[in-house]
Amino acid sequence: MSYSVAVRALCEFTAKVGDLDLRFTPSPSAQEGIVGHRTVASRRSAHYQNEVALEGQYRQLNVRGRADGYDPDANRLEEVKTYRGDLAAQPANHRQLHWAQVKVYGWLMCQKLGLEEIDLALVYFDIVGEGETLLSQRFDAAQLECFFNQQCALFLDWAQLEMQHRDQRNKAAQTLAFPHADFRAGQRTLAESVYKAVSTGRCLMAQAPTGIGKTVGTIFPMLKALAPQQLDKLFFLTAKTPGRKLALDAAQVLYDSSPDLALRVLELVARDKACEHLDKACHGDSCPLAKGFYDRLPAARQAASRVRLLDQRSLRSVALAHDVCPYYLSQEMARWADLVVADYNYFFDFGALLFGLAQLNQWRVATLVDEAHNLVERARSMYSASLDQYSLKTLRDTAPEPLKKTLQRLNREWNALHKEQVTPYQAYATRPDKLLQALSLCTSAMGDYFNDHPESLTGDLQAFYFEALQFSRVAELFNEHFIFDISKRPLSGKRSSSTLCLRNVVPAEFIRPRLTAARSSVLFSATLSPRHYYADLLGLPADTAWVDVESPFKAEQLQVSIVERISTRFVHRQASLEPIVELIARQFAEQPGNYLAFFSSFDYLQQVAQLLAERHPQIALWLQSRGMAEAERQAFLDQFTQHSQGIGFAVLGGAFGEGIDLPGARLIGAFIATLGLAQLNPVNEQMKARMGAIFGAGYDYTYLYPGIQKVVQAAGRVIRSQQDRGVVMLIDDRFGEARVRQLLPRWWAIDAL
């Protein structure tokens, strides 16, 4: 059995030593790096060769990669590195890693062309001044072969263990039995569809109702496909923390049912959740866990590789036992885990770690996108950006002297935009190019300053810098799938301030390449209807398979009623309060127990709750409040017990509208007093106009489909198992409209009240 490794991955394993040090950062963006490489290549001779594919063998190890450039006239192989700031500030261990990479490429080139010697060069390209610093050295082929063999030998012991692990993993996965006595109703259909999709290399949209065990029903068939499809990794991607927990729980169920399952599962969490020293910077002079990080990493990596379930707690335990940073140990273990459980942004964001690693290492991966209805809004936020002028004003007052001039110029260009705008909100058809030029100069100056003063990379200055970089990056992508708008607000006197926003409306062009780069991507949720809405906005390939799994629940388990005599439209809100209160009180009197009541806003929720408390003080009420912390949300849910009786008031689309599990008597009904339609405001109206121009269904794509999806998710909290019984009341006359009813689950038997 052979093991394949990329040159960069090999050298990062063998040649990284010393401290973790992020001071010579942030590095140029991927786009800036591409432009820098092209600029260097354009300055070379006509015979210069770009992106030279190279490959070599050392025992069972296959090493491959692409050298940046080779000049046959000068017999010089170049490794190009783009940077900004003072090159002298580059840590020595960064330079050491770069030399290791070019020396490995050097041997592979000598081997390919039969050379006895070669010039190797590190070309450092300054993306701001566009100057080159060239560090060149001549090497004998024999020297380079010796170096190549040393690196491979260092890696091979690990590679052999990895090959053994992979072999054990694949054998155990092939013989893996389903972890329960039998499949639940619908679960087998889902599992078979997933297996067929990965076997044929297609994307799959799977609409499957809550309660059938979607998590195990998707992970299990993917594990069965590991060996036959030669998959390297599985990525389970979630929108929220509860989704990660369900995936980790499913992994534990698989371990319990199959003790010999050699599967490494890793949970990735956000940096602020994993950092042990939030008050310290990521370098050895500040953080003790960064000091000597790469010297202690091999032992930590070895220990972590022996832990099957590396959830946040287990990984932290290993990291602290070896005095290394838990966050960066988790990033390292993403290279060696078999199933990675992470937030969407780890695969879909601009600088997504998992997608980047998969591309670099040419992994064959499959992705499972949990609660995929959330991906539309999450993706839009990933590819959008905003800047607040008040933040800029604060910075201008407090910024270091070298940055004041460039910040003032940016503010002048910003104010110039206000002259064209007569209304508080206005959308524009083109980008603000003059402002973007000023912003580019500003970020360059800030990048240079941070390189010279790394201790300043904190607080408001850092926050604005990263927001500005994101804004510039999004602006480069601006097309008809984006909206540029300005929201003005008055200050004292005649002065005003504003927020600039580049809003992504259709994320399809960014999501599609991520989905198709995988062997198979499975998007699953209880609410993926209508199919074309998600296919259009997420850019799903034309041959994407679709399965609508039959519900395991019977219509008689859930009494669904449409209350057509009440309108919850804003203009009728005051008139709706009393009838809603009496409806809730009557249902509670007829069938006491725990209910959730969903409303379109906190104001509406509080008005109904206040009137209900006045009219029926004997009914216990629990209210969601704005900005609840995680502990407060849990306390709210803990009030729903098997023996309690009361009404929980919540906002539709909020923390309690999906992803919560209150089985049995913990929840016996839901009142949904809204269609979940987005607020009518200038931004959403602009979105509607753009959706109409692109898809011809502006209202449906902006308001109706996202709203009803929230309604169905909220109703899905009531029936969680085949033993549950419950009631759902849809309160609004519009629920009776044909086009609304056809978006509701097929298995519901709906009455009108």
Image (cartoon, helix red, strand yellow):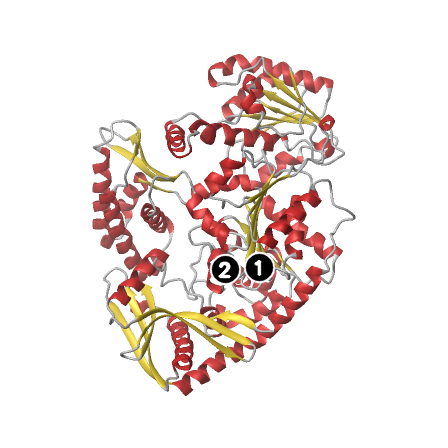
Residue at the spot of label 1: 233
Above or below — where is 607 with respect to 355?
above
Q: Is residue 437 left or right of residue 177?
A: left
- Is the residue 200 above or below the residue 153 in the image? above
Residue 42 or 600: which is nearer the viewer? 42
Can see residue 58? yes
Q: Quadrant of residue 351?
A: bottom left
* Residue drawn at 39 percent across, 78 percent down: 109
Q: CA separation, marks 1 and 2?
A: 9 Å
Q: Nearer the viewer, residue 653 or 431?
A: 431
Q: Residues within 10 Å of mark 2 (few under 14, many from 20)?
A: some
Q: Is residue 288 visible?
A: no
* Residue 258 x %, y %: 74, 58
Name the residue located 20 percent from the left edge and 50 percent from the top edge: 405
Q: Are circles 1 and 2 on residues that touch, CB within 8 Å?
A: yes
Residue that numbered label 2 is attached to: 358
* x then y, percent, for residue 64: 46, 71
What amino acid type is highlighted by mark number 2?
Ala
Q: Secondary structure at mark 2?
A: helix
Q: Is residue 185 above or below residue 299?
A: above
Q: Earlier in the sequence, mark 1 or mark 2?
A: 1
Q: Quadrant of the C terminus?
A: top right
Q: Secondary structure at mark 1?
A: strand
Between residue 748 and residue 602, name the one nearer to us.
748
> In the image, residue 456 lies at what x, y percent?
34, 56
Q: Is residue 18 left or right of residue 483?
A: right
What residue appears at the point 28 percent right and 27 percent down from the top-left corner? 423
For image coordinates 56% across by 34% down, the residue present is 529
Residue 1, x across and y down, in percent: 61, 73
Furthest toward the right, the residue is 181
**Along the line of sight, the residue nearer the viewer: 255 or 288:** 255
